[in-house]
Image (cartoon, rainbow, N blue to C red):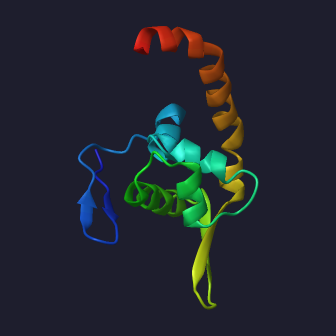
Amino acid sequence: MTIFAVQNDSSMYKRKLPLDLSCGIRIVMSIIGSKWKPCLIDALRESPKRPSELHREIPDAVSRVLNQNLRELEEHGIVEKKIFAELPPHSEYALTELGKSLLPIIDSMDDWGERNRPTFEKLML
């Protein structure tokens, strides 16, 4: 059993559970398994976007959480951040080729959700 330590900007985080890479579903879920990561990937499908544009497209998400999710997606090689050295400075996020390879999964999730919306509207309302 291996415990991985992940360095982030503020402190050292130690994973409490071992990272299981023996199952493809667990690998995918460890990368996109949060409330906003699939939405971020979907929002970046057409073109690079500034963080403020992403916040406008996903207004229910708190900025801090979106920024953290973007950092994690960048660490996993799903998105890349380009910083423009001009005044005023700004940055953009874009999907990498690895990130683009997730789009069929995101599309399948969206299709399934749309097909089953009536069922879940009855259950959840």
- Residue 94, given in percent of the width and then of the height, sits at 67, 62
Task: Identify the residue at image location x=50%, y=59%.
Answer: 70
Residue 17 figure quarter: top left
Above or below — where is 81 with respect to 63? below
Query: Which quadrant of the rendered structure holds the N terminus?
Result: top left
User: Closer to the camera, 24 or 47?
Assistant: 47
- Residue 36, given in percent of the width and then of the height, sits at 48, 45
User: Closer to the camera, 56 or 83?
Assistant: 56
Say left or right for 47 vs 67: right
- Residue 38, given in percent of the width and then of the height, sits at 56, 42
Total marks placed: 0
Q: Which residue is situated farthest in the right direction here?
A: 46
User: Closer to the camera, 62 or 77?
Assistant: 62
Task: Identify the residue at image location x=62%, y=89%.
Answer: 85
Task: Identify the residue at image location x=59%, y=79%.
Answer: 90
Residue 4 figure quarter: bottom left
- Residue 72, given in percent of the width and then of the height, sits at 46, 58
Above or below — where is 5 with respect to 90? above
